Image (cartoon, helix red, strand yellow):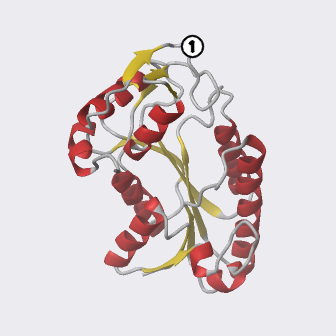
Amino acid sequence: MARIIVIGGTGLIGSKVVEKLAAHGHEAVAASPRTGVDAFTGAGLRDALAGADTVVDVSNSPSFAPADVMEFFTTSTRHLLEAEADAGVAHHVALTIVGTDRPQDIAYFAAKSAQEALIRASGIGFSLVHATQFFEFVGAIADIATEGDTVTLPGALVQPIAAEDVATAVARAAAGAPTGDREIAGPEAFGMDEFARRALAFRGDRRTVVRDDSAPYYGAQIAERTLVPVEGAEIFPTTLEEWLPRNPARP
């Protein structure tokens, strides 16, 4: 069994990854600023990584402003890779996004792409788990596209996945040998507008969702298939209809 350090291990995905790894007998350690380990500043990293076989990075930027998110992912990743090299870590696992390798102008995707490049060039064995949008993000997607009582979103396709399934994929990657890049997704593809419309309707949200293919997604226009996986992606089973009753809107 391996000693696996999970950076961002107290968050939505990280806490689930720690739980899944521990259930299979691994020594899984949650590391985050809350536990005294800060990859962005480097604080606590050397001690946390001592004796580690694998490091999993599921941390996220506290700010999505273009300069901030780029600085967070590049600085944190450099600190992690340097500490891993010193500690003799053999496997670096990072959660990233489907679509970072495709033409788009999303600042967050550009920052994740820069992170991926650093990992690939590090000389450390790696697994990059590219996930589609989480079901859990549907509320935020609708909120940023809302003006008055209208939500305006493009019909570009999404194939969202449950956070629980993402955590399963990341935990499996961490427990295995380095595999390079892989994509994961949920079982259904539909327009982004339909994704929001179905979720809001189920939750009794009275906002009207309107499709406008010129509408931006996080500040950028996207092509129809930018956010869906390529052939060969691993497909997880949870559907939106199964997920919604388990995840009511927060009061």
Q: Along the horizontal axis of the image, is 40 left or right of 55?
A: right
Residue 229 visible in the displayed image: no
Q: Position of residue 69 (x, y in %)?
A: 71, 49
Which residue position holds label 1? 214
Q: Position of residue 102 (x, y in %)?
A: 62, 29
Q: Is residue 251 above or below residue 123?
A: above
Estimate how packed mark 1 is, as few (under 14), some (14 to 19) or many (20 or more) residues with alpha carbons within 10 Å: some
Q: Is residue 159 above or below residue 80?
A: above
Q: Along the horizontal axis of the image, is 246 left or right of 122?
A: left
Where is residue 187, by image quadrant?
Answer: top left
Residue 154 visible in the displayed image: yes
Quarter of the image containing the N terminus?
bottom left
Farthest residue to the front: give it. 148
Residue at 67% of width from left, 51% of height from top? 63
Residue at 71% of width from left, 61% of height from top? 77
Q: Position of residue 244 (x, y in %)?
A: 26, 43
Q: Along the horizontal axis of the image, is 209 left or right of 240?
A: right
For label 1, the SS is: loop
Residue at 69% of width from left, 53% of height from top? 120
Instruction: Give, as a three-letter code, the residue at label 1.
Output: Ser
Where is residue 110, by image quadrant?
Answer: top right
Q: Is residue 225 above or below residue 15?
A: above
Question: Which sits in the foreground, 136 or 249?
Answer: 249
